[in-house]
Image (cartoon, grey):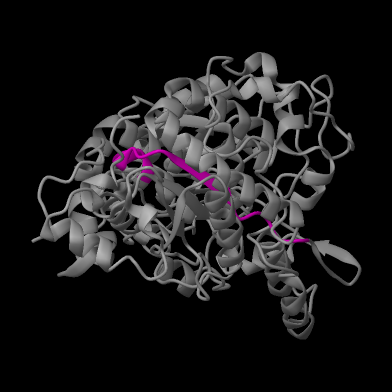
Amino acid sequence: MSERRSAQWYGGDDRNSYIHRAWMRRGFPADAFDGERPHIAIANTASDLTPCNAHLNEVGRSVADGIHRAGGIALNLPVVSLGETQVKPTAMLWRNMAAMAMEEMFRANPIDGLVLLGGCDKTIPALLMAAASVDLPAVVVPGGPMLTGTFRGTPLGCGTDVWKLSEEVRAGTLSSAEFQRSESSMIRSRGHCNTMGTASTMGLLAEVLGMTLPGIAGTPAPDSRLLEAAHATGVLAVDLVDQDRRPSAVMTRESFHNAIVALAALGGSTNAVVHLLAIAGRLGIPLTQDDFDRIGAGVPLLVDLQPAGRFLMDDLYRAGGLHAVLAEVQDLLDPTAITVIGEPLVSALGVAQVYDREVIRPRADPLQMEAGIAVLYGNLAPDGALVKPAAATPALLQHRGPAVVFDSVEDLKARLDDPSLEVTPDSVLVLRGCGPKGYPGMPEVSNMPLPAKLLAEGVRDMVRICDGRMSGTAYGTVVLHVAPEAAAGGPLAKVRTGDPIVLDLENRRLDVDVPAEEWAAREPSAEAARAYAAPARGWEKLYVDTVNQANTGADLDFLLGASGDKVARESH
Ligand code: FES
């Protein structure tokens, strides 16, 4: 066995190693520092202000028990936590900050390996980005989804049903009092959102990438099997360090191929695109948006979960879980991609069974034949834009209609329900100023609400175009992640109300039908430019100055790639 990394702190008999050991004694036996036992940090995003992750302290205790049982030293390491529903202006503004802070603390501390505890939307992406850049042996325990709550006898999909119920209020078909009454039914238990939103998607994809103990992703947060799996993960973490199996050996180009296949078969969140691109960027893997369209194109949608379908995450677990889904598309998976246990991902799929064919459809009878995320290009999106056909109205995916343009979220809120707004069901709602730089932070606003007067007429979907993101729990014919964004000089800034917009999914096009000469001569909207106030200081300034566009993962330009686990100098 080569020298453990932690021995660089604790080995020897000089003053510095004395200091490193002495301050860590606090109940540890002397052999904790003899270089034999791996020191494993449990990077824990538990926080009372991240309600989806609040149970991770208990999960961490099971991980620690497993680490101790296998002879390691377990160390709780609280890291930056992001509560999707709590932080303003948008949790995505802080994903890269969380990842950067995690990376630096993983590198700066005397640890040999990592167990990563996450759940809420940005936490698993940030943990994986950090682990990829520091490249210490690491394994994820996804915190798991919450149980299903019910309202008026009907299951509630958290997130998705908030949008639906609030639209019902605006349409006058649900009273405000009833809407408020549903609030206490929405979150039934510990755990993250129970639809196939971003948290569920990223927890499952962490396993497909190979970064969890096989078979644990999707275990509901209150299920005792999650704690059993956490204990086993602690045991595994010690072996992982002994084997020196690092994220760069697990998360390979082949693993990302499998993640894209799984994303399509699961009907996962569009946010997974920007997160997987960012993680791949940390590993130096040349993944592109086009890979999502190319690899996902022939993958059928097999999982009938909200927001695209009917069921929720505990139904998926009951029906056989992730492995049962992957077994249906095993021929599309790369058989060489390995997991943290050193075995191919596909080797775990032989025993998978489907127990409910309503929830997990057979390959021969999918919900949709082609479920991948489509990438559109055109004079409105030179660097691409996404649309998730599984969540869209099929008839709207080939559409031509006049633009109704909003310069900011505030502009949208001020004018959307104005009875004098000139808008028809054929109009295309365009919202700009919501990209990484423009907002800043690329919020989940692309699934903009529909105008009240159209809702009252029974309209439930329209083509919407935005340079922001969309909640993984949302639905509709939404073209999003338009790149470059308006605030970075993208053509979205030049669109005017009334311009004909053409969405052509079949040919993967998104264009404004304005004569080329006129379009080339047109100036960006001064009104839109006024909406982007450049931040003067702090993280927001650093972010706006250095953030990349959505089509490459919206990471900071200087965080691409890895710095490894080496620290150059002593601490004094
Ligand atoms: Fe945390 Fe949805 S708000 S996962």
Against 29, residue 232 (above or below) is above
Question: Residue at point 22% right, 57% down?
Answer: 544
Q: Nearer the viewer, residue 32 or 251?
A: 32
Judge from the rendering whether residue 353 lies leftward or rightward of residue 429; answer left or right: right
Q: Is residue 193 visible?
A: yes
Name the residue furthest bottom.
177
Tell me the magenta residue range. Answer: 131-147
The part of the image, by quadrant, that contains residue 56 is bottom right
Question: Residue at point 27% right, 69% down?
Answer: 23
Q: Is residue 512 visible?
A: no
Judge from the rendering whether residue 194 lies leftward or rightward of residue 382; answer left or right: right
Q: Nearer the viewer, residue 96 or 452?
A: 96
Question: Residue at point 53% right, 68% down?
Answer: 416
Residue 22 placement (x, y as % from top left): 26, 66
Q: How many marks?
A: 0
Against 341, residue 422 (above or below) is below
Q: Nearer the viewer, residue 218 or 291?
A: 218
The part of the image, by quadrant, that contains residue 158 is bottom right
Magenta span contains residue 15: no
Q: Nearer the viewer, residue 48 or 456?
A: 48
Magenta span contains residue 132: yes
Residue 442 placement (x, y as % from top left): 39, 55
